[in-house]
Structure formats: C-alpha cells, structure tokens
Image: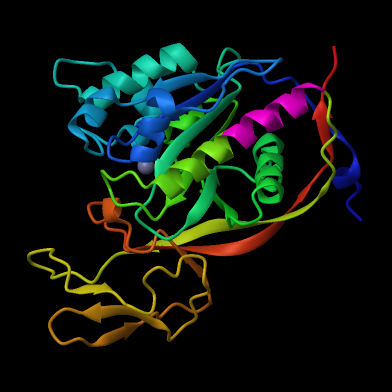
Amino acid sequence: MDTSSSSQVLLPPLSRVVVSGGTHGDEMGGVYLVQGGAPCLKRTTFTAQTILSNPRATEARRRYTEADLNRCFTSASLSTPLSADSPYELRRAQELNRALGPKGGPGAVDVICDLHNTTTNMGLCLIGYSTRDWICLHLYRYLQEQMPSASVRYLVFEEGEEGSYSLESMAKHGFAMEMGPQPQGVLRADLFFQMKQAVTHTLDYIELFNTGTVFRGGGVEVYRKVCTLDYPRDPHTHQITAAVHPQLQDRDFCLLSPGDPLFLTLAGGETLPYEGETPLYPVFVNEGAYYEKNIAVTLAQKETVLLPPMSVQRE
Ligand SMILES: [Zn+2]
C-alpha cells in the first residue's frame, strides 16, 4: 500500500497572488474582470494583484497582435534576446516575467490564476501542467464542493520539450481558468458571474490554506491530454473539407468511442467516424481559436489522482 498518500503535506504560505485576464484579448470574461469587475481581492493574509496581460490585443479586441502571448513563456522564449523585429507579445512576456517571475526562480509569485474563455462547451475547467501540484488540485476539489451546480473539471497538459509555454507557468502554482461556451469578443453575463464566483472561491481557498485549514486527502478525477486531431483538409489549399460532426458539437467531456461520428464533409455531407483505437474524452471541440493551430478536437483520458492531506507549513 502506498502510505505516502496518507501522510500530510506541509507547504509554505501563499502571499503573492495574481489574477490575470486578457492574455487573449478577445476573451472578455477575464478582460472585464481585471478591468474593474473583480471581486474583493483583499484577505487578511494577502491581497491579490490583478493584471491585464495583453493590453494591446485587448485594445484591438483580438486574441493577439503579432504572436500568441500564451505560447511565449517557454524558457527559450523568455531568454531570447529582443530585437527591433521581435513580436510585441514576446516583449510583453519578458516584461511580465521580470515583474512576476522569473519563471522557475525562488522570487516568482506564488499563485497565478489566468482567466480565459473558450468558444467550446467546457463549462468551468482548470488547466494545469502537473498532477502533483497539490495547491492547484486541492483548489480544484474545493471549487467542485463550493460550486456544485457548475461542472468543474481539471485538464492536465503535458509539458513540451521546452517546458510549459503559458503565462501561469511563471508562478510556483499556476493554473488557467477556462470558461465556456462564449464567442470571441463577447461577454456573457452568466459566465462572467460564474467566473467571478470561482475567483472569489479561489481567493477564499488561499486564505483558508494560509490560516491553517487542513485539506483532507482523497481522490479527484482529472483529464489528461493525449493528442489532438486536425480537421480534414485539402492537401493543396489547406482549406478544411469537413466540419465537426453535429453529434460531437458541444459534447466536450462526453466519451468518444471508435466509430462514433467525428466530422461531416462539406462537399457531400458524409460522416467521418473517429478511427482511434480507444475511447477518449473530447475537449476544446471546435474551438474558434484553434483553427489556425490545426486543432479540431483535443482528446483526453480520465485518471484519478490521490490527493494527500495538505496544510500550511508554520515557521
Ligand atoms: Zn485563452
């Protein structure tokens, strides 16, 4: 029996907390939340800082202006010498890394909650890079308990060869908070207030942790990214030749089995089935921002992670 899972983990208090929005300038929940709609950010043990990550893209109401900011936080990008030709977002990433990082260093902020919206039907979904970040995973369970009517899920992305690439990876404990479905450039009140509530609970959780609450151990279900699928495309023009199948549309986190409808061809209305060998969970189904990234669907597998009991380390 694995006894390590039952021994209590002690972690340092979380004093520097950042809530960021507008990392993608057309994801309006985070933009409006940090531009004045934020919940009370002050607690007794810390005051969270809000940051508008990409002011230029937000002004233009676009995802980015020259490069996707949320892919600029690899160690390689952060250490690239800047020149007159460097994209604005690379400059901004290095500026943020000086203010909130340096990534991986002892001076980095403790927590970054980076707010995003997705056009897909993913509900409230935390995204992290690790199944051993107990701060993030206990938060996940806390949000599930506090927001039972929202289906809160946790998606794990593997680090690439250059490590993690997204903004929240600068923090000791970083995660993205995705909320959908919301079209690009649009603010939906229902999702905005759900996001605001989730941020409030996040700050409450950090306060509870800092003031000595013991979070009990136990299992949580997470989704781990396995692969992505592109749209069928014309080999010469690269134009898509099929759309996500109506029976898959909006069915994020609903099991996709081999043979299930995946795409519908534009020319003939022919159904193209999922040809994978194992059933997997689709996420980011038909995400508007991912056409340019050649991703129609991301597939994930469900896993159980055993959380150890956790509390703050006293001096
Ligand atoms: Zn985003």
Q: Residue at x 71, y 38 (%)?
A: 134
Q: Quadrant of residue 116?
A: top left
Residue 123, percent from left and from top: 49, 55
User: Which one is in front, 293 or 211?
Assistant: 211
Magenta extent: 200-211
Q: Quadrant of the N terminus?
A: bottom right
Above/below status of 268 relative to 156: below
Above/below status of 30 relative to 290: above
Q: Quadrant of the C terminus?
A: top right
| Number of numbered discs on residues | 0
Q: Main secondary structure of the magenta part?
A: helix
Q: Is residue 94 visible?
A: yes
Above/below status of 311 relative to 221: above
Assess whether residue 233 is covered by the magenta stretch: no
Residue 203, percent from left and from top: 63, 29
Q: Quadrant of ligand 1?
A: top left
